[in-house]
Image (spheres, helix red, strand yellow):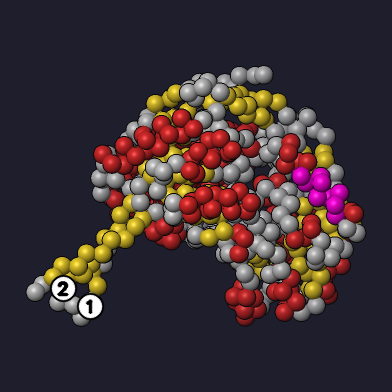
């Protein structure tokens, strides 16, 4: 086992109440480099006692008011400083994310670090907009509303975009005046630990942001069930999301659930095929296909179906797959061995179900890492498990359609509804189809156009609530009405 020389916490401890500390029982868990299959370092594995200490620290910080007692404008100034520090430390943060997740370093810089900084900057600007309103009523009274923070927020984040999906929760939660206990994914805790120190340097008071690393069944479960938590913000699989929402329901905690996805990407015969192919490839290989809003289901108008398959068969094998440390790499390894095995199992299932492998269909043997070649599969029926379920890897299924109605029906035929895409040269069709697609966000003539001002989230089994936009900020607040008699 090697020592991770730049671990900002030294031995990788918990961050509770502004202090670095070991787990109460001394337990630790390994962090693996997915590009080589070797151990980078170990971090503390929090138990129930550690989670309790973190929630108590967050509760004390909330109740005593060093953060919630500030004006929104003052909180905004600190969040601006967080954004500045992220940009100043961009190289190191991108390197952490690349090593931990297997994310190509160019992608980590351009997408993860940039978007994380933008998150805090955006909510810094919105922090001072949280005000109430007077309400006109027939009562002989002055009626007005106040909007304030909820209290302690549990932020539980996944392995695929650790930095961005932490920022999408922590930034609006802090802007609204809440305190936070962050539980990052078991496999990818390093950027969360780095951010803990960065918050402290930016001037976030002790106890306002706490980080507990460890496993989902132990640390995550303890955080879900803790009576001191006032809201749960969760991103992860639909199966775990169901459990989290059920636990939250026992004590009627508000939740935001951003869950699994299996987005359809519709290409109509009037689309610009050259541009469409670029969007199609980006949609299914982005982040090695480990993207809940990725586009793994391609639906193509029959007149251009064969042509598009031929183009993909030639273009996809040319996408650079390899060491995430190299700037030219577009597709890195899967984030872990279990994720790689899952993709292998689904591709084997596709063969059993009568699928034709157009390209890819096998792992790539490179440096002992968890690599899988981008794969395109044709000739699967719509009720195939590989079409209907979330593969979560660089795998694209391709189906033809004969009409706009059929395209929409196929797109809406899975239990998921997180994202969708439309490729068309018709403005009328773009609006018409987007309106009919059951998805929280629809992209037209591109994919993954994201900004903190634009909310995203799911319908159906892809969850509920929204991240990004003023909608997310509002979800971290509660409204109180005050009615003053003028009699």
Q: Residues within 10 Å of mark 1 (few under 14, many from 20)?
A: few
Q: Residues within 10 Å of mark 2 (few under 14, many from 20)?
A: some
Q: Is residue 427 visible?
A: no
Please name the residue shown 83% across and 50% down the image: 347
Label 2 sits on residue = 141
In which quarter of the view is residue 479 placed? Answer: bottom left
Question: Are the two marked residues, 2 and 1, in contact with CB atoms closer than 8 angstroms?
Answer: yes
Residue 58, how many percent across, how many down? 37, 38
Q: Is 343 in the magenta?
A: yes
Say if 231 sits above or below 299 in the image: above
Residues shaded magenta: 342-350
Q: Which quadrant: the N terminus?
A: top right
Q: Which residue is outermost to the front? A: 250
Q: Is residue 132 visible?
A: yes
Q: Is residue 322 left or right of residue 420?
A: right
Q: Is residue 149 left or right of residue 448?
A: left
Label 1 sits on residue = 137
Residue 363, how many percent across, how many down? 82, 41
| Distance Cα–Cα, label 2 vs label 1 | 8 Å
């Amino acid at each position: 086992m090697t020592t991770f020389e730049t671990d900002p916490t030294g031995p990788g401890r918990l961050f509770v109440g502004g202090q670095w500390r070991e787990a109460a029982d001394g337990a630790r868990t390994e962090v693996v480099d997915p590009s080589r299959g070797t151990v980078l370092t170990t971090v503390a594995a929090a138990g129930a006692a550690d989670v309790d200490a973190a929630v108590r620290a967050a509760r004390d910080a909330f109740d005593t008011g060093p953060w919630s007692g500030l004006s929104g404008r003052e909180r905004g100034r600190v969040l601006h400083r967080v954004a500045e520090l992220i940009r100043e430390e961009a190289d190191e943060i991108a390197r952490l994310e690349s090593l931990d997740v297997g994310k190509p370093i160019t992608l980590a810089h351009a997408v993860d670090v940039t978007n994380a900084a933008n998150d805090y900057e955006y909510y810094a600007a919105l922090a001072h907009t949280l005000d109430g309103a007077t309400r006109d009523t027939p009562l002989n009274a002055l009626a007005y509303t106040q909007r304030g923070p909820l209290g302690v927020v549990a932020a539980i984040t996944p392995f695929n975009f650790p930095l961005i999906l932490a920022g999408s929760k922590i930034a609006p939660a802090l802007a609204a005046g809440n305190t936070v206990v962050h539980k990052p994914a078991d496999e990818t805790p390093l950027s969360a630990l780095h951010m803990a120190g960065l918050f402290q340097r930016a001037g976030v008071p002790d106890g306002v942001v706490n980080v507990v690393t460890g496993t989902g069944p132990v640390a995550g479960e303890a955080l879900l069930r803790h009576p001191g938590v006032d809201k749960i913000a969760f991103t992860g699989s639909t199966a775990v999301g169901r459990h989290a929402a059920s636990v939250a329901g026992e004590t009627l905690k508000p939740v935001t659930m951003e869950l699994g996805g299996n987005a359809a990407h519709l290409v109509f015969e009037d689309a610009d095929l050259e541009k469409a192919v670029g969007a199609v490839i980006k949609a299914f290989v982005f982040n090695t296909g480990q993207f809940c809003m990725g586009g793994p289901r391609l639906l193509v108008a029959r007149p251009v179906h064969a042509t598009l398959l031929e183009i993909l068969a030639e273009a996809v094998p040319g996408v650079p797959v390899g060491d995430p440390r190299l700037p030219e790499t577009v597709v890195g390894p899967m984030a872990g061995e279990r994720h790689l095995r899952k993709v292998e199992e689904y591709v084997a299932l596709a063969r059993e179900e009568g699928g034709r492998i157009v390209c890819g269909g096998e792992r790539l043997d490179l440096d002992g890492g968890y690599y899988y070649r981008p794969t395109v599969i044709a000739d699967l029926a719509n009720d195939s498990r590989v079409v209907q379920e979330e593969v979560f890897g660089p795998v694209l299924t391709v189906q033809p359609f004969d009409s706009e109605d059929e395209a929409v029906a196929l797109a809406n035929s899975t239990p998921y509804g997180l994202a969708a895409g439309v490729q068309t040269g018709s403005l009328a069709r773009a609006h018409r189809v987007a309106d009919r697609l059951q998805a929280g966000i629809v992209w037209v003539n591109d994919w993954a156009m994201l900004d903190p001002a634009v909310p995203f989230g799911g319908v159906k089994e892809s969850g509920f609530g929204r991240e990004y936009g003023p909608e997310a900020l509002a979800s971290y607040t509660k409204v109180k009405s005050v009615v003053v008699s003028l009699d």
